[in-house]
Amino acid sequence: MTVLRKEMFHLPDGMIYLDGNSLGPLPKAAPARLEGMVRDEWGAHLIKGWNVDDWMGQPMRVGNLVGRLIGAAKDSVTMGDTLSVKVYQALSAAVQMRPDRKVILSDTGNFPSDLYMAQGLIAQLGQGHELRTVAPEDVADAITDEVAAVMITQVDYRSGRMHDMEQITKAAHAAGAVMIWDLAHSAGAVPVDLEGSNCEFAVGCTYKYLNGGPGAPAFIYVRPDVIGDIQPALSGWLGHDAPFAFDLDYRPAMGIERMRVGTPPVLQLTVLEEAMKAWDGVDMADVRAASIELTDLFIELVEARCPELTLFSPRNAADRGSQVSFAHPEGYAVMQALIARDVIGDFRAPNLIRFGFTPLYIDETDVRGAVDVLADVLDNRLWDDPEYKARSRVT
C-alpha cells in the first residue's frame, strides 16, 4: 500500500525537502491543534488542565503512539526531556545493573552526544569505568565479560549504516551485558522490534522522522521485566510513585513512569501527539519498502549523473537506514548551493552531503528533481562561490 501522505505536511512550494532525518516538516494540523490547546486548555482551564485535559497522562499516552512504531509493549515507553538526558538515564541504570563490570562499549560511528554523556557519567561515578569504542563492524566481537553495557545507535547518523539489532543484542546478552539502543535515526524510518529483540533499554528523539518539531521531547523504553529493579539516577518528582504525597524521600513509580524526571513539556507533546496522526494505519514494513525504492533510485541516478561524488552509505539497502550520504571534497559548498536552489539536505564533516528520505512526503518525482539540481550544481560548478563556503554555525 502507498504510505505517501504529502497533503498532511506543510512543504513550501518548489522545495524538495530531503532533511527529515534531521528535522521533520510541520504537520499542517499542528498549528491549529496547538492554538486550540493554548486557548481552550491552558487558557480556559489553567491548572485544571493537568486533570481535565490529562496533561499528566500525556507522556504515557504519546509514548504508546511512539511505541507502536518501534515494537514496544504497551506502557513501556514514556516521553520527556531531551535525548541526551534519556541516554544518561538508560546508561546509568545499565551500569547499576552490572556493578562488577567497568566497561561501556560503543562504536566510533555513534553520535558524539551519546559518547559525551557516557564520558560525563564515568567522570561523575569515579569508580574506574571505561568507555571503549570500536569500529562499527567490530562491535559484536568486542563484547566481552568486562562489558557492563553496550550502547549503540542503530542507524549511523553520517552514513546511514544500520546495525543488526537482533545479532548485537544476542551477543551482548551472551556475554552478560546490558543492551541500550539509540533509535534517533530509526523511529519512523525502519521497522524496529524492541520486544522481539529483548534489549533492556532504547531511547530516541521525535523531531526527525516523527515530525514533532524542534526540541520535541525524547522517549525512553525499558523492558517491562526489568523496570521494577531500576533505581533512577535522576530521581525527579514526577518519577515518584506518588508525586502529590510530597514525601521527603524518593520512592520510584512502579512502571515506566519511574523514568520520568520533571514536568512534561505539554506544548511540545501536544504538537507531537498531533503529528503522530500521520502514522494512523501506516505499516512500518510499507514505509521501509518505499524507503528502499527511493534511496535505491537516488543512488542509481546520482552515480549515473554525478560521477565526482563517492557513495559513503552502504550500497546494499538492507544495510542502511532511510538516508544516503555522498562524499565530495567541497561537500559543504555543494550542499549550500543545493539549499540555495531549494533542495534541502545537510552537511556532515568532514566532506559528506547527506539526504534523508521520508516516504510520508517524498516520492519519485522529488528524487528525480533533486538529482537534476544536484547534477546542475556539480556540472556547472555552481558550488564554487565564496558565499557557499562561509561556514554557518549549524551545518
Image (tube, helix red, strand yellow):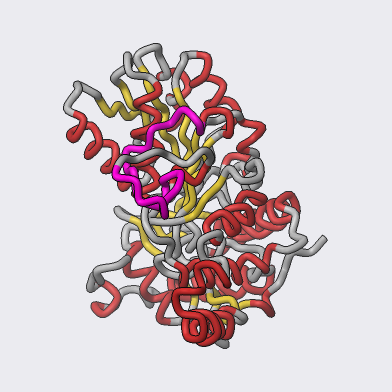
Q: Is residue 107 visible?
A: no
Q: Which residue is nearer to you in this view: 209 or 117? A: 117
Residue 75 placed where, x, y %? 61, 46
Residue 237 placed where, x, y %? 36, 51
Q: Residue at x 44, y 60 (%)?
A: 217
- Above or below residue 47? Residue 86 is above
Q: Residue at x 51, y 61 (%)?
A: 56
229 part of magenta stretch: yes
Q: Is residue 282 visible?
A: yes
Report which quarter residue 16 is drawn in.
Answer: bottom right
- Above or below residue 272? Residue 100 is above
Q: Which quarter of the image is occupied by the C terminus?
A: bottom left
Q: Residue at x 57, y 78 (%)?
A: 30
| Residue stretch in magenta | 227-248
Q: Is 367 placed left or right of 2 in the picture?
A: left
Q: Is 256 placed left or right of 124 in the picture?
A: right
Q: Is 274 placed left or right of 307 in the picture?
A: right
Residue 355 placed where, x, y %? 50, 61
Q: Which quarter of the image is occupied by the N terminus?
A: bottom right
